[in-house]
Amino acid sequence: METWKESLESYDFAGDRRISSTLVRDGSKLSMSAFDADLQILSERDVVADMSIEGGKEELRTTLMLGAEARTTLMRSNIRLVVSISKKWMARSFAAGNGEGSKTSNLYNGGWGRPSLDEVIQEGMLGLARAVDKYDPGRGLRFSTYSTHWITSYVRQCFQTASTGCLKVPAQLHEIKSSYRSLVKGYVESSEPVPTEDMIAKKLGVTVNRLRTAIRVTETLLSIDEPVYNGGNSAYKGSGAGGDNSGESTLLLSDRLECTELPPEDFVEVSFLRQTLENAMAAELSPHERDILRLRLGLDDGQPRTVRQVVEECGGGLTISDVRSAERRAFKKLRSPNSLHSHNLVAYLEMAGIEYDPMRC
């Protein structure tokens, strides 16, 4: 059987190495459809003469099916190992994120920065499948010992991906942050002063910028729907995905966020108002009156000016009375009924809640 396996792995199926990979190396493709599709490339002579299989394609197909069944049996026999490793990682993550005295009711539930037990088991099964495909009994290792490495690797990657959400962060940065936390925790537990970032980076064998990058990019993302106060219990903090509505009043993180910018619809209205006002000023006012009004209201730079500041910017060529007179004439022209209706300024008065009385204009 060993001679047959070596000949199968080294055989060039019609010059295409992908067929060899499908039949031998990639156990995830061991299925009836994959066998039938790949065996169609081989002729009976190739199987008997070149691969030294006397039974031909039928014997090759039977042998491959027995290998697929053995792979499935090996995976099913080690599901308990996957579940055991997954539960250990879930308990460790729950204790690190919630403390020792936290309730264990949500131990196996997922959150914004932590996967659920089902997700961890699924990733562990992928690691188990990888271990089955790469296992070599000739190395003298038990399969449980060998598969533990791959299962743990996939489970660890699952927790790392969940902590950073949609951001793909290299595993090396997660390892640097884990080493940094372990080192700081050791100093805190021993009541010793925590060293500076330069000293910690030197002990970890990385640069300070690399350490700061690892700490910053591996921070857990926050959901704006995460409750910071729930039903009078200020200690409650977690995701609302589980449907826990025990509190009467819930304060979400989004309720504490304030935006100082204008809403998009208001920004569009302000832009239209600015364009309408520019058209009205260009049609109704003289250049001198437009310049005075721009300076007084700060239409160009957003900085309104007093009458005395306008006089100073004009170089002293105007007096205070000249500025006030030009400003009065400009406002009177813009407030006239003809100007308000012809340039559609009445609509903006109603939008601002200003009552328009034609008799007062």
Image: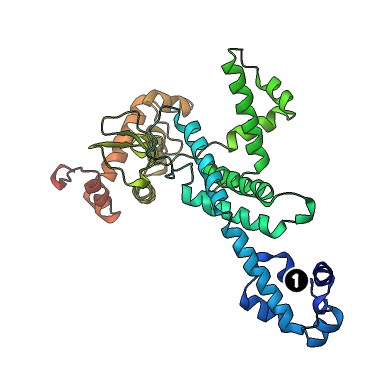
The spot of residue 260 in percent (x, y) is 39, 36
Which residue shows up at 61% across the image and 12% down it?
192
| Outermost left residue | 359
How many other residues sit within 10 Å of disc 1, few (<14), some (14-19) or many (≥20)? few
The spot of residue 80 in percent (x, y) is 54, 51
| Quarter of the image with the C terminus in it | top left
Residue 341, placed above or below residue 200: below
The spot of residue 217 in percent (x, y) is 59, 38
- Residue 180 seen in this snapshot: yes
Out of 327 and 156, give the one closest to the viewer: 156
The spot of residue 325 in percent (x, y) is 31, 32
Which residue shows up at 65% across the image and 17% down it?
195
Residue 176, quarter of picture:
top right
Look at label 1 and name its amino acid. Answer: Arg
Q: How many circles with numbers are drawn on the protein?
A: 1
Query: Image check: 15 left or right of 174?
Result: right
Out of 341 and 146, give the one closest to the viewer: 146
Out of 248 and 213, give the one closest to the viewer: 248
In the picture of the structure, the residue carrying the numbered disc 1 is 18
The colour scheme applied to this rendered structure is rainbow
Query: Image check: 110 left or right of 158?
Result: left
Which residue shows up at 68% across the image and 30% down it?
209
Residue 107, placed above or below residue 126: above
- Residue 281 seen in this snapshot: no
| Outermost bottom residue | 44
